[in-house]
């Protein structure tokens, strides 16, 4: 993995975070939007706040921008306590979900807007705006008004405007939500590229887990105002700390049962008269605890003959989905659960081996799945 | 094009006749050579000449314009401020009461508004003249401005103001540089509405006008009581002409703008 040679300041006890969110809560009347959250975000990170709508991610971002004040706790930016600092006094800029481009100003004037407020001289402003136009490849559209350009171009104007003042922190609120899928994928890589070139710290809010995984150095998964897990995309996917995270990120098969703990292994007893299935355990589990076995579809092998793996189950093919790059098989186990398994279509001409109603075996290695406490 | 049925033709004719026959008669008789309004004695423009030489009418017209411009400007400033606070500052104690009180003069009978203003001016010893008419017109037209502007502010994307703050504006700069230019068409519409109301007003003006200042509606009304003169017809024709050309120009301009904008939007998608 490339992660190995990338700096990971969050694993370095000597590193000072750029942003410290310490025990922050936000209540609106009776409703608690943010419940005692603490996160450290380091300089030059691309940090994603991920969660379903209503999980509090937008509120947390608005507190960073200064549009909301925490009910409890403290936010510091570069060592400075942000309590009582108005949005216009913060070295933080935001790219709004609706882009919030000023409709009465041209692209050029939109980008220059923040620079003019700082009272810099005209030559410097013009040079900076031109630099931003170049960075976002908008030189041709400088004189146009926002309604005279396409959605993707508007998105880039919003980004250029927010970056123009060279903020310490750039906040992006669902920045790609309004773009269609193809454009979104291209723009994700463009965003990463711009983030790297400018060296700005980005915090992105999104409900799209694929987007968070693609762009972010670390992802914070939120649910009901609480932080569930903060980790690199790889660890979030491969080492989820809870059923919630495993289920929210990507596809997963979940089998419920009871933990069987011996000296150094954890297994899951999941059906009467069936051998327990093994996986890596997360957290501490005691014998007999309710637990859930989680395994990603691509980590399951499918075969007609009984495999030699210890973890194997037999079932009948219920459904086959052909997705082009891979095929998914839904296999009905006689004990009840339906297991999804994915097989890459590596060869263009090979005939597919299985069809509906076939009896097949599913198997996986001892380290392929996780036993999570419920 | 489909031919209209006889029923449609008849109802259209009746409807427009009902609306416009009185005005057509007025315009036609303004070109009457005779002094008697109801007797046609050939075409002439002499009453227009008479009108231009009539100092009293010209003075009244000037007072009306002055009052209209001043009062609608004050009303626009106050009405926009009131609308902004009502729409933006969310809920505060007594918000419903305040917003109700802003709109109350809309339904208040003009006679009562006029009378209460008259009593106020007498109580504070203010001589009636241009100033009192301006104050009175500002009072009753600011709530119309407030209605027009707040309906625009309700649909205004809040994040535009937040973006202005985020980029370093103080709240007042944000209002001046972002909010105001965007809501400008509504503010202008509010100003025009206030100006029209002021030109049109007879009741409140007659309570608050003094011997030193008379507005055109008061002048027309009082001269008609002594009999309709062809001069009044000429004056009314001029007013109709101004209003009609104003409406035509405004609708042509806005039609052109809409067409240009949708053409630009189509060009952006390609």
Image (cartoon, coloured by chain):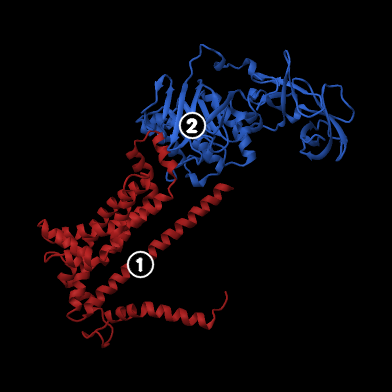
Q: Residue at x 77, y 20 (%)?
A: A366
Image coordinates of residue A93 in percent, x first then y, are 45, 31
Query: What is the letter of the blue chain?
Result: A
- Closer to the camera in the image, B127 or A74: A74
Q: Position of residue A142 (x, y in %)?
A: 48, 39
- Residue A184: percent from left, percent from top: 61, 37
Tell me where residue A220 sits by quadrant. top right
Q: Please give the count of numbered marks on the rendered protein.
A: 2
Taking the spot 59% from the left edge, 41% from the top edge, the residue there is: A179
Work out whether residue A129 can be spotted.
no
Q: Are marks 2 and 1 on the same chain?
A: no
Check the residue under mark 2 and report the chain it is in: A
Question: Mark 1 = which residue?
Answer: B245
Q: Which residue is mark 2?
A: A34
Say if mark 2 contacts mark 1, CB within 8 Å: no
Question: Residue A119's x, y, as percent?
Answer: 34, 31
Question: Chain letter for red?
Answer: B
Decide if residue A194 is on the left or right side of residue B138: right
- Residue B55 lies left or right of residue A57; in this view the side is left
**Position of the N terminus of chain B by quadrant:** bottom right
Seen from the viewer's position, the closer of residues A3 and A188 is: A3
In the depicted view, which residue is nearer to us: A265 or A82?
A265
Q: Is residue A149 visible?
A: yes
Q: B65 above or below B44? A: above
Q: CA distance from mark 2 to mark 1?
A: 59 Å
Q: Classify residue A64 by image quadrant.
A: top left
């Amino acid at each position: 993995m490339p992660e190995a040679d990338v700096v990971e300041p969050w694993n370095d006890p000597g590193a000072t975070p750029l942003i410290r969110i310490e025990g922050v809560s936000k209540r609106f009347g009776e409703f608690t939007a943010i419940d005692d959250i603490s996160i450290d975000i380091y300089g030059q990170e691309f940090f994603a706040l991920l969660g379903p709508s209503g999980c509090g991610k937008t509120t947390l971002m608005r507190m960073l921008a200064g549009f909301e004040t925490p009910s409890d706790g403290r936010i510091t930016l570069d060592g400075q306590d942000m309590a009582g600092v108005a949005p216009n006094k913060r070295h933080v800029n935001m790219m709004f979900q609706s882009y919030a481009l000023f409709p009465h100003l041209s692209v050029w004037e939109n980008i220059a807007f923040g620079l003019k407020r700082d009272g810099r001289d005209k030559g410097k402003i013009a040079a900076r705006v031109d630099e931003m136009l170049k960075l976002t490849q908008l030189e041709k559209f400088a004189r146009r008004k926002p309604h005279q350009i396409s959605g993707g171009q508007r998105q880039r104007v919003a980004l250029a405007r927010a970056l123009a003042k060279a903020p310490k922190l750039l906040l992006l609120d669902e920045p790609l939500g309004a773009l269609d899928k193809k454009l979104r994928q291209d723009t994700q890589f463009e965003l990463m590229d711009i983030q790297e070139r400018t060296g700005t710290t980005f915090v992105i809010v999104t409900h799209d887990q694929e987007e968070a995984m693609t762009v972010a150095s670390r992802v914070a998964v939120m649910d009901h105002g609480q932080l569930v897990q903060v980790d690199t995309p790889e660890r979030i996917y491969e080492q989820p700390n809870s059923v919630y995270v495993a289920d929210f990120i990507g596809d997963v098969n979940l089998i419920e049962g009871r933990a069987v703990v011996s000296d150094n292994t954890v297994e899951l007893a999941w059906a009467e008269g069936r051998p327990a299935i093994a996986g890596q355990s997360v957290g501490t589990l005691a014998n007999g605890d309710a637990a859930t076995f989680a395994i990603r579809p691509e980590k399951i092998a499918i075969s007609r003959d009984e495999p030699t793996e210890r973890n194997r189950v037999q079932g009948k093919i219920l459904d086959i989905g052909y997705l082009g790059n891979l095929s998914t098989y839904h296999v009905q186990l006689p004990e009840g659960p339906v297991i999804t398994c994915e097989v890459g279509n590596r060869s263009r001409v090979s005939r597919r081996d299985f069809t509906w109603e076939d009896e097949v075996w599913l198997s996986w290695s001892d380290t392929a799945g996780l036993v999570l406490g419920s | 094009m489909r031919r209209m049925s006889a029923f449609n033709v008849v109802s259209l004719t009746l409807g427009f006749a009902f609306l416009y026959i009185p005005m057509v008669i007025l315009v036609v008789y303004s070109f009457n050579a005779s002094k008697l309004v109801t007797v046609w004695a050939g075409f002439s423009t002499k009453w227009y000449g008479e009108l231009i030489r009539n100092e009293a009418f010209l003075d009244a017209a000037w007072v009306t314009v002055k009052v209209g411009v001043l009062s609608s400007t004050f009303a626009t400033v106050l009405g926009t401020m009131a609308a902004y606070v009502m729409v933006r500052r969310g809920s505060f104690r007594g918000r419903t009461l305040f917003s109700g009180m802003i709109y109350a003069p809309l339904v208040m009978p003009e006679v009562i508004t006029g009378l209460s203003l008259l009593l106020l001016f007498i109580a504070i010893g203010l001589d009636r003249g241009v100033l009192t008419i301006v104050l009175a017109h500002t009072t009753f037209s600011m709530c119309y401005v407030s209605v027009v502007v707040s309906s625009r502010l309700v649909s205004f994307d809040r994040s535009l103001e937040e973006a202005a703050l985020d980029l370093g504006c103080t709240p007042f700069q944000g209002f001046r540089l972002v909010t105001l230019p965007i809501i400008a068409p509504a503010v202008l519409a509010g100003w025009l509405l206030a100006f029209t109301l002021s030109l049109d007003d007879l009741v409140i003006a007659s309570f608050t006008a003094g011997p030193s200042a008379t507005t055109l509606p008061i002048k027309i009304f009082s001269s008609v009581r002594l009999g309709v003169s062809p001069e009044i017809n000429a004056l009314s024709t001029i007013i109709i002409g101004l209003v009609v050309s104003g409406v035509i120009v405004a609708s042509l301009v806005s039609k052109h703008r809409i067409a240009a904008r949708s053409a630009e939007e189509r060009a952006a998608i390609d």
